Amino acid sequence: GAGVSQSPRYKVAKRGQDVALRCDPISGHVSLFWYQQALGQGPEFLTYFQNEAQLDKSGLPSDRFFAERPEGSVSTLKIQRTQQEDSAVYLCASSLDQGRAFFGQGTRLTVV
Amino acid sequence: QQPVQSPQAVILREGEDAVINCSSSKALYSVHWYRQKHGEAPVFLMILLKGGEQKGHDKISASFNEKKQQSSLYLTASQLSYSGTYFCGTEKISQAGTALIFGKGTTLSVSS
């Protein structure tokens, strides 16, 4: 596709429910990043892939968060047993190398 | 390792100038600048790769002082379209790879 695509755009989950957020990066982009952005804050780093390898997951806030990119393209961020503090916009970005990053529109997750 | 931005917010009239600063306690190898409008994805502005490098397009430019571990974004003769939140991003380099880490952002409001 022309840009980074994320789905769904909006997700409302009941507390305790599991959710899966999808990111379709720009074709050929090696690096893929996930960020969590709370209202009025900057994007907080969650995790980083280079192709299918998850090189850095130091930003994942708890073991309820899990990300994968099995074929080095589409990535899924999964949150188990969602909590209210998980409510945020989840941004995905991809880049060809360590240069310009292209962001998706994000998924706004609301946990009720 | 998160870069520190200042000021947190700037209010301008059209035509006025602004400077946004970004500093890091760690050595900087590159600095990325992005702008995010409300409800939209961050959009790439520019990347500075070498200490002392300056870049710009239109009336937005940036400089990178490697020794001082800081970068500044200059907005000259601001336009209404410049309103948004500006983020600087720096590279977190580890054995695991290179991840892009953002500051908390500087919100710029330009009025007529």
Image (cartoon, coloured by chain):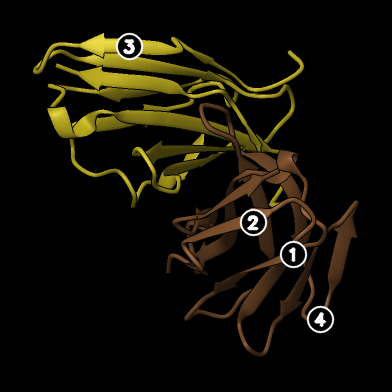
Chain colours: A yellow, B brown
Quadrant location of the N terminus of chain A in the rendered image = top right
Mark 4 to mark 2 CA distance (whole Å): 28 Å
Question: Do the residues at discs 3 and 4 belong to one chain?
Answer: no
Q: Is mark 1 on a helix, strand or loop?
A: loop
> Nearer the viewer's eye, disc 3 or disc 1?
1
- Residue B75 falls in which quadrant of the image? bottom right
Spot occupied by residue B48 in the image (x, y as percentages of width and height) = 77, 65
Question: Do the residues at discs 2 and 3 belong to one chain?
Answer: no
Of residues B111 and A104, the one drawn nearer to the viewer in this rendering:
B111
Residue A100, visible in the rendered structure = no
Of residues B97 and B37, the one drawn nearer to the viewer in this rendering:
B37
Task: Mark 4: give few (<14), some (14-19) or many (20+) Cα within 10 Å.
Answer: few
Residue where numbered disc 4 is placed: B52
The tag on residue B12 is: 2
Mark 2 to mark 1 CA distance (whole Å): 8 Å
- Residue A107 falls in which quadrant of the image? top left
| Amino acid carrying mark 4 in the image | Gly
